[in-house]
Each structure stands twice: as C-alpha cells, then as structure tokens.
Image (tube, rainbow, N blue to C red):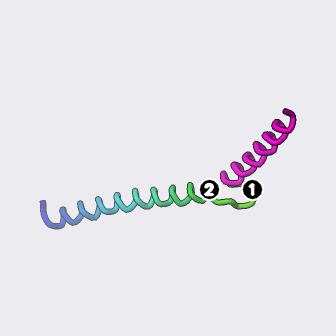
Amino acid sequence: MTPADWGGLAVSILTIILAFTSGIRWLVKHYLNELKPNSGSSLKDSVSRLETRVDEIFKILSERK
C-alpha cells in the first residue's frame, strides 16, 4: 500500500470513530435531559408525581388501621 492509501485508511477509520462517539454523546445528552424536571413532561416529573401519590395512599391506609 502506498502512503496515500494508508492516509485514506486512517482518515476513514477516524471518521467512523468520530461518528460513533458523536452518536453516543447525543444519546447520552438526550437521555440525561429526561432526568431533569421540566414542568411536567419529563421522566423525573412523572416519578415525582407517582411518589407523591404513593405517599398519600400510604397515609390513607395507615390512618384506617
């Protein structure tokens, strides 16, 4: 292989690695964004609402005994 072939191979491998890492970073960023409260539509907000409801149900059940 000539030096130009080696250079082309190196550039193509680096491009593939860069595309892969950029995709992973994008996915992580958007998944972590779901864990921040945003006034109602995030996963964090849903879990907080469920925790509040479970606490209220627990209070009601403990008062009945």
Task: Give the side of residue 2 with respect to residue 13, left or right.
Answer: left
SS of the residue under disc 2? loop
In this view, the residue farthest toward the right is 64
SS of the residue under disc 1? loop
Report the quarter where the N terminus lies: bottom left
Q: Main secondary structure of the magenta part?
A: helix
Specify whether residue 58 is painted magenta: yes
Above or below for 30 versus 64: below
The residue drawn where x is 53% and y is 60% is 29
Amino acid type assigned to the residue bearing label 2 in the image: Leu
Mark linked to residue 64: none
Q: Residue 31, how many percent across, how many down?
A: 56, 55
Q: Label 1 belongs to which residue?
A: 40
In this view, the residue farthest toward the left is 1
In this view, the residue farthest toward the front is 65
Amino acid type assigned to the residue bearing label 1 in the image: Gly
Specify whether residue 30 is painted magenta: no
Nearest the eye: 24 or 8: 24
The residue drawn where x is 34% and y is 59% is 17
Nearest the eye: 57 or 48: 57
Q: Residue 30, how many percent across, how many down?
A: 56, 58
Q: Label 2 belongs to which residue?
A: 35
Q: Residues within 10 Å of mark 2 (few under 14, many from 20)?
A: few
Q: Going from the N terminus, do you reach mark 2 or mark 1 first?
A: 2
C-alpha gap between disc 2 and disc 1: 12 Å
Q: Residue 44, how many percent across, how many down?
A: 66, 54
Q: Which residues are magenta?
A: 43-65
Q: Residue 21 occupies which quadrant of the picture?
A: bottom left
